[in-house]
Image (spheres, helix red, strand yellow):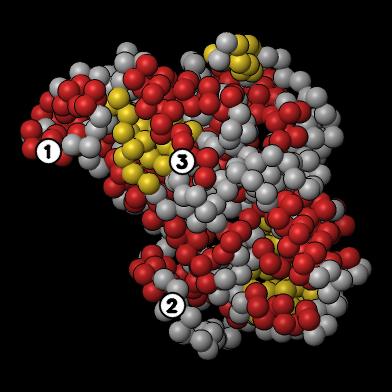
Amino acid sequence: MSKLHSRIIEITKRISERSINSRNKYLRNIISMEENIDTNRNAISCSNMAHAVAAAPSSDKASILMNSKPNIGIVSSYNDMLSAHKPLEHFPKVIKAAATQFGATAQVAGIVPAMCDGVTQGRPGMELSLMSRDVIAMSTAVSLSHGVYDAALCLGVCDKIVPGLLIGSLSFGHLPVIFVPAGPMSTGITNEEKNLVRKAFAKGDATREELLKAEISAYHGEGTCTFFGTANSNQMLMEIMGLHIPGSAFVHPHSDLRNAYNIVATEQAILISRKGNDIRPIGKIIDERSFVNAIVGLHATGGSTNHTLHLPAMAAAAGIKLLWEDFSDLSEITPLLARVYPNGKADVNQFHAAGGMSFIIGELLDAGLLDGTAKTVWGENLFDYVSEATLKNSQLIWTKSKPKSFDSSILKTVEDPHQKNGGLKMLKGNIGKGVIKISAVSIDQQKIKAPAMVFDNQNEVKEAYDKGLLSRDVIIVVRFQGPKANGMPELHALTPILSNIQDLGFKVGLLTDGRMSGASGKVPAAIHITPEAMDKGVIGKIKNGDEIEIDAISGSINLNENFSNRKLVLPNDKNYKKNFGRNLFSLLRQNASDAENGAGLDLINTH
């Protein structure tokens, strides 16, 4: 067992110290819930309990009514339109059968909304996307509000769903909760092939039929998309935070192994439930160590920049305050161990086959870069997550494994990493603060100084590109894309355009108060700029031709102009927020925290 890195100790300590008041309030709330009579089914009125079991199988009614067996609540993000969520349709049936087998009951407590950024990208629905995280959190709380459960299983995978499920679960922090993933779809055409067709289409060198054929070949079945964006980063995080059954993150939805994992998750939820002998409330399991481990995992795998928004929001739900400087400082000591698209050619299925999460966790533990004493839902602590599960007679058999990479082009060791740091940096300067992901950006592109071209939305950028106005050294500024302006949509549609400009030999960068997720790729993108334009941030005062400098090496973003007397000019169109459901999210936008604090509900101050 290696000694824990001194910087890990230092950063964990400072997070703990800055969070002491809110964390203590949160823990007192858990104790209050544990002692509350409302968490004892024996104290719930007969009428209330009759409603709770009215639709239950007759074989389960008596045990739920009499509080004689553990009752597991299932919160699912199932829908049958989206590939990642379709597999969840049949999970409750498996879970309920397993619960019966292990002397318990299970009920579907609720279904939370689950939208896909891939479908809404560049469209009005995208402006509901980030805010849907808070809707999912509230929906999870509503699902658990009936108060008749001894533990919960959260079934979810994609971008806002897992953070929302965790935030909602932490509001019922006295309950033990295990996360149950669906797994990735099988490999189609490579992500690199798909990207080449997208770039060709953006240049007019590929037809819409050719583009559609490539997209359908890439996204072709049930399960998550196979690139390492936010959805698969979620699964990595849940495993490295100890909320999964070990090794379950990237197993195909319809495999026998996945079915066995679902059964084991049910059994473990029963064992750690409030009626078990090893009660593990999620609010007590998840602490500062868990979130430091999560950030280290994010860096080591080249995960999605969206988690510079989600992790602070998830931490705040547990009374813990994360700052971007924590991400940046941890990046400096965390080597990049994985190359998975868009940071490499491999997909998540290849990542899993090459050694996957067991390798990542084992390597980082051996190097003292993960705190193995962090509590988990399985085993004693995170050290028990360095293990491989195989099927024997339909049962999972666990074997302690020595970390080994079966493909060094995908997974490398701490001693010989792909890159010496995690590739995610905080930027700070007279424009404000932001983040940049450089794990796929070549060193000669990590510092750029160029004149600005300013746009209020990504459609304006596309129009300028089509007119040939962007074939030059340029920093494209896309403002009024922050949480208070329009809900902070992702700007994925700009990726092929930016890449094409760079391929022509020009220096190009992006500066935005919006999001870019895990697919910013090889173009330097200064994103999540705060204060955002709608909060009178400097990004809203930039003019065409202004010289901007983005320096990912030193971690700075500056406007090399005198802007002290400039006034903010708001977009002309004030009606765009009033249709396609966006009016319903106006209160969430108006009350959104800044990007560094999660770009959503201000949870740190609610404890």
The residue located at (55%, 15%) in the rendering is: 394
Tell me the residue that label 1 is attached to.
48
Give the number of the mark in front: 2 or 3.
3
Amino acid carrying mark 3 in the image: Glu
In front of the other: 287 or 504: 504
Residue 35 placement, left or right of 305: left
Question: Residue 477's quadrant in the figure?
Answer: bottom right
Judge the density around disc 1: few (<14), some (14-19), many (≥20) Cα neighbours within 10 Å: few
Question: Residue 67's quadrant in the figure?
Answer: top left
* Residue 579 numbered mark, or none: 2
Do the residues bearing badges 2 and 3 touch, measured as CB atoms within 8 Å? Answer: no
Tell me the residue that label 3 is attached to.
89
Amino acid carrying mark 2 in the image: Asn
Amino acid carrying mark 1 in the image: Asn
Q: Where is residue 574 in the image (x, y as percent from the top left)?
A: 46, 85
**Number of numbered discs overlaid on the protein picture:** 3
Q: Position of residue 450 (x, y in %)?
A: 80, 74
Q: Is mark 1 on a helix, strand or loop?
A: helix
Residue 28 placement, left or right of 389: left
Q: Is mark 2 on a helix, strand or loop?
A: loop
The residue located at (71%, 55%) in the rendering is: 216
The residue located at (68%, 44%) in the rendering is: 226
Sequence-first tag of 2 and 1: 1
Sequence-first tag of 2 and 3: 3
In front of the other: 508 or 459: 459
Q: What separation in Å lies between label 2 and label 1 (alpha carbons)? A: 40 Å
| Looking at the image, residue 310 lies above or below residue 566 | above
Residue 283 seen from this side: no
Residue 273 seen from this side: yes
In front of the other: 453 or 207: 207
Q: What element carries label 3?
A: helix
